[in-house]
Image (cartoon, rainbow, N blue to C red):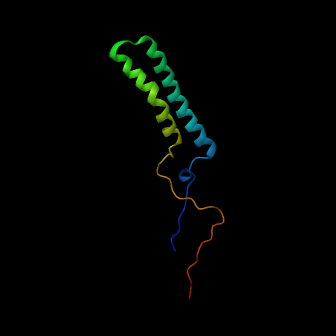
Amino acid sequence: MKSTSHTITSLPPSPDQERRRRMLEYSIMMGIRVLCVLACIWVRGWWLLIPALGAIFLPYFAVVVANAAQSGARGQVERPGALVRREDRR
């Protein structure tokens, strides 16, 4: 029988930690968008295209990044009380 051990570092983050991370990433991206909108007031010529595109497309990317599941090297965690099949000993 193969025994699998798990450490606390292989557990996924708690829902509160995950929510906080997503909100922080989203807030940072929306802050950058506000800077892009403000830059559109002062920038002229072809340079205006850069902050304008940022102001238009950053909300989409912010939502996609915030809702994307964080992928990493996480181990599979069995729920407590999971049934374990024993080998027949004869």
**Image point (62%, 71%), residue name:** 83
Q: Is 44 on the left-hand or right-hand side of 23?
A: left
**Image point (56%, 50%), residue name:** 12
Q: Is 13 situated above or below 75?
A: above
Q: How many marks?
A: 0
Q: Is 16 on the left-hand or right-hand side of 53?
A: right
Q: Where is residue 40 in the image (x, y as percent from the top left)?
A: 44, 16
- Front residue of 87/26: it is 26
Q: Is 11 situated above or below 78?
A: above
Quadrant in which the C terminus is drawn = bottom right
**Image point (58%, 77%), residue name:** 86
Q: Is 14 on the left-hand or right-hand side of 72?
A: right
Q: Position of residue 53 (x, y in %)?
A: 41, 25
Which of the 4 quarters of the picture holds residue 23? top right
Q: Is 2 situated above or below 76?
A: below
Q: Residue furthest right?
A: 81
Q: Residue furthest bottom?
A: 90
- Front residue of 35/3: it is 35
Q: Position of residue 43 (x, y in %)?
A: 40, 13
Q: Position of residue 82 (x, y in %)?
A: 63, 67
**Image point (50%, 45%), residue name:** 70
Q: Is 49 situated above or below 11?
A: above
Which of the 4 quarters of the picture holds residue 19? top right
